[in-house]
Amino acid sequence: MEELQRISGAADGYVAEGFRVVTADRESFLAEAVIGAGTVDGPRRTAGPVRRLFTDSVE
């Protein structure tokens, strides 16, 4: 998660490598990022760069 740590406002995060969802009946969290800021708009500005770090696919 080195890339995440380089984003201003991103505090922490993880990725569950190799995680596979086998049912859509429940929420499945494959990755999570903790962001924060001193203003209301701060997290919104940080969310875009954080989202771009993660990819997903449906097979």
Image (cartoon, rainbow, N blue to C red):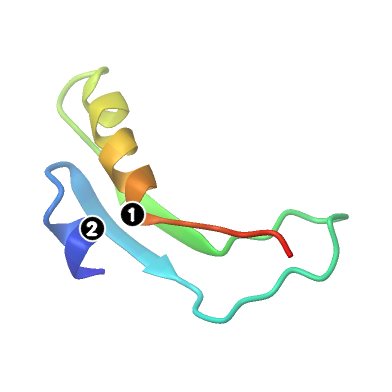
Q: Left or right? Give the position of 38 relative to 43.
A: left
Q: Quadrant of the C terminus?
A: bottom right
46 over 1 or under it: above or below: above
**Disc 2 versus disc 1: nearer the observer:** 1
Q: Is residue 7 left or right of residue 15?
A: left
Q: Quadrant of residue 47?
A: top left
Q: List the single residue furthest toward the bottom.
A: 18
* Image position of 16 (left or right of 42): right
In this view, which residue lies farthest toward the top?
Answer: 40
Reading the image, the residue beneath label 1 is 53
Mark 1 surroundings within 10 Å by alpha-carbon count, few (fewer than 14), some (14 through 19), many (20 or more): few
Query: In terms of secondary structure, where does tag 1 sit?
Result: helix
Mark 2 element type: helix
Bin the neighbour count of mark 2 within 10 Å (Cα to Cα): few under 14, some 14-19, many 20 and up. Answer: many
State the separation of the CA atoms marked 2 and 1. 7 Å
Q: Is residue 39 above or below residue 19?
A: above
Query: Residue at image x 19%, y 62%?
Result: 3
User: Residue at horizontal 26%, vertical 69%?
Assistant: 1
Give the image quarter of residue 12: bottom left
Estimate the x, y position of residue 44 in percent, counting from the top left. 31, 25
In this view, 23 is above or below 20? above
* Camera-side residue of 38 and 30: 30
Whether residues under marks 2 and 1 lie with C-beta atoms below 8 angstroms apart, the answer is: yes
Q: Which mark is residue 45?
A: none
Check disc 2 and give the amino acid type.
Leu
The amino acid beneath tag 1 is: Leu
Mark 2 or mark 1: name the one nearer the start of the chain: 2
Residue shown at the point (18%, 20%) measured from the top left: 39
Total number of numbered labels?
A: 2
Residue sitting at 31 percent across and 46 percent down? 50
Read off the residue under disc 2: 4
